[in-house]
Each structure stands twice: as structure tokens, then as C-alpha cells.
Amino acid sequence: MLADGIVIIGVNHKTAPVAIREKLAFPEDCGVPLMTLMDIDGCDECCFLSTCNRVEVVFSGRDHGEASRAVRRFLFSNTGLSDEEAQKYSYFYQGRDAVDHLFKVAASLDSMVVGEPQILGQLKKAYRDAAEHKTTGVILNRLFHKSFSAAKRIRTETNIGGSAVSISFAAVQLAKKIFGKLEDKSVLLVGAGEMAELAAEHLVSQGIGRVVVANRTLERAAKLAQRFNGTAVGLTELLDKLADVDILISSTGATDLILRKDEVKSIMRQRHNRPLFLIDIAVPRDLDPELNDLDNVYLYDIDDLKNVVDINKAEREKEASRAEGIIAEEVIKFGQWLESMEVVPTITALRQKANAIRDSELAKTMGNLKNITPQERKSIEMMANAIVNKLLHAPMSFIKGGNGANGGCEHRQVNLDLLRQLFDLDRDSSDE
Amino acid sequence: MTLLFHFTLFVYGLATAAYLVYFVSRNKMVRTASRSILLGAGGLHTIYLVARYVEVGHTPLTSNHEAVSFFAWSVTWAFLSFRWRYQVKNFGAFVSPLVAVLMLIAAFSSQEAISLPPALQSLWLPVHASVAIMANGFMALAFCGGLMYLLQEREIKKKKFGVFYDRLPSLEALDNLNQHCLAVGFPLLTLGIITGSVWAKQAWGSYWQWDPKETWSLITWLIYAAILHQRLTVGWRRRRAAIMAIVGFSAVLFTLWGVNYLLGGAHSYAG
């Protein structure tokens, strides 16, 4: 019954074209949408996630039929679409399906680029905002925490985020395999193509030490260099510069080779054989393919990098199916916890725990008392029973009472959660 | 005694298996386990060496069994001391099999204790032999690092990413490892030769008498000296350094065994 209370309504890159998604985009501040959502009748807890590829509302409550329509109305308020059309562009998950969906989003299985790492951070931020505005309660707190830990488990147990699936990132990963740390290394950008810029950006974000830009027009070089806090040189200085950089990314529009094997061969001597990683993303190619034959020179052209990316993508697909297995496990665990968050299972668990303690303590005491009559034994057992019952009476009527008089179902959940924590009832069942 | 040795050998085998399982599975728990097992094996081995010392009455470095067993011990502890300072991914999968092979060789050589001729009963025995063999331990690590470098480099160069690409560390890390091993191993090697020569003066009356073991030690030393010299001046690093580490280590092995079996000489009764 509780499980059905969790609902996710949202829009992502699969269900809606960008023309719709951009109309749904919400400003940075989450406070307003969260407050609007909390005003909806039947929405007890909620969290709101908005990224460039998805907008989602996760909420928990009763009477979700009406509440769902209201949430959809709120999501699509800027589009002017009718509820029927809105339904077409959005998805609706409830109960176990909702849990499964959220876990997949957190683990980046639902992303446009499966395995990309940003989504987890965005989700964490969305949750933090909601928690700050106090729009989450017992159910969503646990749901989000479990989705984060499931995502973490998938990161460590599968290789889903391990391999680069974009050309520029594949280049960065190779650079790391060759040079280890990039902090004391430098990169020379030759030409100023978009892809070269992107690769340079990745290198900078991975901490590359120095950026040098060489271009036919010095002005353009200077502009680009400024962006990366680097220096600019003319194309004529290419060979001089090559002696002291570690990575070269070439993307000029030249129709001819700009760097030949013999030129680099003599430079390698000058470099004391420090390795050189050459990345040629120009078509037609800028760098002599035979450069790869030189010792300690590694040349990758655009096709080589594409190959790396294709292999990595296939690898990710394989890892994604392993990740789904992990998610299925975690969804079941969460479902068990949700079921236990009712009054009856909690009372049963509390009773069982108390009885187990009573029985083991009795056994210990009886073992020490050798010379007692059966009657004495009986009264000791009765005393232990009475203590347990009297101690349990108050907490039990406390959670039973929370049912009606003390407010709604949300209140009862808080009480249940408190009780379960006080008596440590969740240790074996759902915590790791 | 033999039982203790065999048990140590068994634990080394276990550590090797664990490291190889980690190499394939990449399960972190297996890695932790393999480290602990190797540490245990190293500890047992230490106990064995001490027990052997007590049993034979002098430093147990005179027979082939003893020398090779001590060699395995020094590779293990050189590796473990490295692990303590910095981490090289999957290094253990290369080092532990080498240790296991050395231990197997030790197991198959005669474990009889060799009584020392009076000329050799000197404090220089433990000093000279242990320093020389510890140098070999570090050279063995450089060898493993060189092998890993070549395997990793091949995949990057050929652009075919197989089993090693993800599992081995960056080329830079492997090259640093090589340099570090030589930086420790080479002074030890030098010291080994110097102490040997001092001892020779004491025992035989002359510092150097060109017996095959001495000659080959000198050749080995010259190879490593050349590697270091070239590295610092012309920049023999990376691939060439990796190849040279392998060449150097073959010279080490030849000095250790080849000389004994093929050339004889004053050292031939010893390891």
C-alpha cells in the first residue's frame, strides 16, 4: 500500500523532443517549484529534478490520481498542452516501477550517454534542495539515499563509467595511460577546430599543466590561448615548440602534411626521448601516419579514436545489463523496507526482537541456577514475560495511536521510522 | 625444517594464485586478500631463514637452495616495501609468479647444509652475499616493471586494447618504477661487489682475481651502470629502459646460475 504511494512523473530525451523539453526548463532556484508541488493535495513529500535532458517530479502521497494530474499540469504549465497531450510526452511510474526508474536515473542507465557521471551529482543536488526546503520525509529520504548507494555500488562493481565514449575524452584517457598524471605536462593545439578545443577543454579539466596554441593567424591563436590561460605562437614555431610539449592536437585545414617523420625524429633526440602523444583530428590528415613507427611516439588519428570509442560503447552496453541486475536487487531490498514500514510488521519485528532477548537472557540465567524447583522456574519466566510486555506496551500504543488521532499518514511514518531506529529493527533486513 | 619450507612455498603459491585471480576479476577484496597472503608468506619465509641459520650454524647463503630461497625472500620484501610507499596496479600479478618460480627452484635443489671451509668463515659472508642478493631482488622488480611496460606499450602503440590496457598502470608510472628500482638496486649491487672484493682480499689475499663469478658480476654491474648513465645523459628512458631492465636481469640470472654450471671458479660451491 505504501509502495504505491511513490510516484514519478517526468519528461526525458526519450519521451519528448527538445522543442517540448526546453519549454519545461525551470530556473535554477528549486524553492518555487517545490513549494508549488507541496501545495498539491495528496502530495506529502516531493523532490524536483531539472536538467537539460530531463525534468522529473518524485513524490509520495495518497490519492495519486488527482495529485498526478496536478503535477502534470504544473510541469507543462508553460507549454499550453492539454493533459492528454502532456501524458503522451511524459512518463508515469508508480510503486516498484518508480523505485526502479529512480535507481536507473541515479546509476545513469537512463541517460542519453549511458554511464555519464553528471546525472548523479544533479540528482544529489535536487535532493539536497528538497531536503533544505523540508519537502522530503521518511520515504523519500530513504528512497534517495538508497538510489545513491545503488549508483555507487554500480560504479564500483561494474565498469559502466570506466571507458570514454566521446572522441575528445578518449584522447584524454589515452593521454593518461601514457603520461599518468597530467599536471606537469603540456599540450600544443595546432589549428583551432571545434573538436580540438573540446579535447583541450577536457585536458584542462583533468589538470594539464600548460596549453600552447599555434595557428596560422596569430590573433585567433591568442584568443584561444587566453581561454585556456596559455600562450600563443605562430605556425612557423611549430617545430621549436614541439621540443618541449608532451601532447599535440592537430586540426588544421591544411591539405598537406604539416609534420613529417624525419622532422620529429630529430626532435625526439632533442627531447631526450620523452614520449610524445600526437592526436590528429584533421581530415585530410595533418600528421604523417608513419610517425607512429618512431620510438616513444604515439600517433592517433580520428579513425583510431573512433575505434576506441566504438569498443568502449560496446563495453558499456555489456556493463549496463550487469548494472540492471544490481538495480533489480536493490529495488527488492527497498520494497522489503517499505513493506516493513507499516504498523503491523513493525509490531511483529519489535515483538520478535524482544522475545529473542528474553529467551536468550532466560537461558543464561537458568543455566546458572541449578537447584530451583519447576515452580520457581515458572515464576522467573513469568516475571521476564511481564517485564517485556510492560516495556513494550507504551511504544506499541504510541505507533498505533499515531494512526488516527495524531495526524495523517505522514506523521505515522515518522513515528514508525523513529521506533525502528530506537530499537534498531532494520539492521539485517535492508541496510548494507 | 623441510616442512616449514614447503609450507612457505605453498603460501607463496596461494598468493600467486590470488594475485592472478585479482588480475582477471579485478575484485578489490581479492586484492586485499592476496596482499595479506603474500605478507604471510614473507613472514613465514623470514622465520624459515632464521631457523635455518640456527640449524646450520652460519648465515644460510652458501648452497644454491639457500641463495635462491634468499633471492625469493628479497624480491618479496622489496616488493612489499614498494607497496608500502606507492602503488603500481597489478604489479603483484607479475612479481608473485617470479617469486613462486624461484621458490620452486629452491625446493628442487639439494637442501643439504654445506659446511664452510675455514677461509670463508667470516662476517663478510652475510654482508657480501645478502647485499648482492638484495640488489638482485630490486633488479628482479625492475625486470617485472620492464615486462609490464612492454606489454602496455604494445597495446597503446598497436591501438589494440586487450587484457593489459585497463589492468596495467600508465607508461609513466611503469617507467618511474623502473627508475626507482635501479636507484635502489644499483647502489646495493655496487656495495655487493665492493664487500666481495674486501672479503676476497681477506680470504684469498687479493682483491680481484677474475674468477668467472667476479667477471660476470662486473659485466652485470657495467650493464646497469650503462643503463643509468644513458638514462641521465641521452635519455634512454621508457621503452629502451624497459628492454634494458630485462637484459640486465638476464645478466643477473646468468651471474647467479650460468656461471656456476657453465664456468666454475672460486664461487662455484656457493650460490
Image (cartoon, coloured by chain):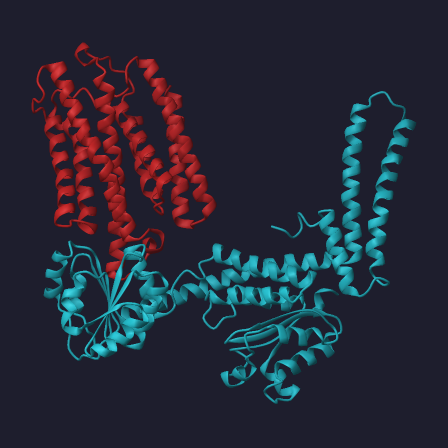
Q: Toward which corner of the image does residue B31 lie, by quadrant?
A: top left
Query: Is residue A332 toward the left or the right of residue B179 in the image?
Result: right
Query: In the image as oriented, which residue stretches furthest toward the top?
Result: B118
Depth order, front residue of B55/A168: A168
Q: Is residue A30 above or below residue A205?
A: below
Q: Colour of chain A?
A: cyan
Residue B261, how many percent across, how many down?
16, 27
How many numbered marks have been drawn onto this rendered protein structure? 0
**Would residue A282 be visible to someone looking at this image?**
no
Residue A215, by quadrant, is: bottom left
Whether B271 is drawn above or below B15: the answer is above
Can residue A127 be seen in this snapshot?
Answer: yes
Q: Relative to the observer, which residue lies in front, A132 or A117?
A: A132
Q: Residue drawn 41% across and 38% down?
A: B35
Q: Residue at 12% of width from left, 23% of height from top?
A: B264
Q: Is residue A296 left or right of residue A148?
A: left
As displayed, is residue B69 above or below residue A181? above
Visual hue assigned to chain B: red
Q: Residue at x 35, y 66 (%)?
A: A202
- Asked whether, in this view, residue A407 is left or right of residue B51, the answer is right
Quadrant in which the N terminus of chain A is drawn: bottom right
| Coordinates of residue B62 in the picture (x, y in percent) | 23, 19
Where residue B111 appears, as percent x and y from the top left, is 29, 20
Residue at image coords 42%, 50%: B26
The percent coordinates of residue B205 (x first, y second) are 9, 15
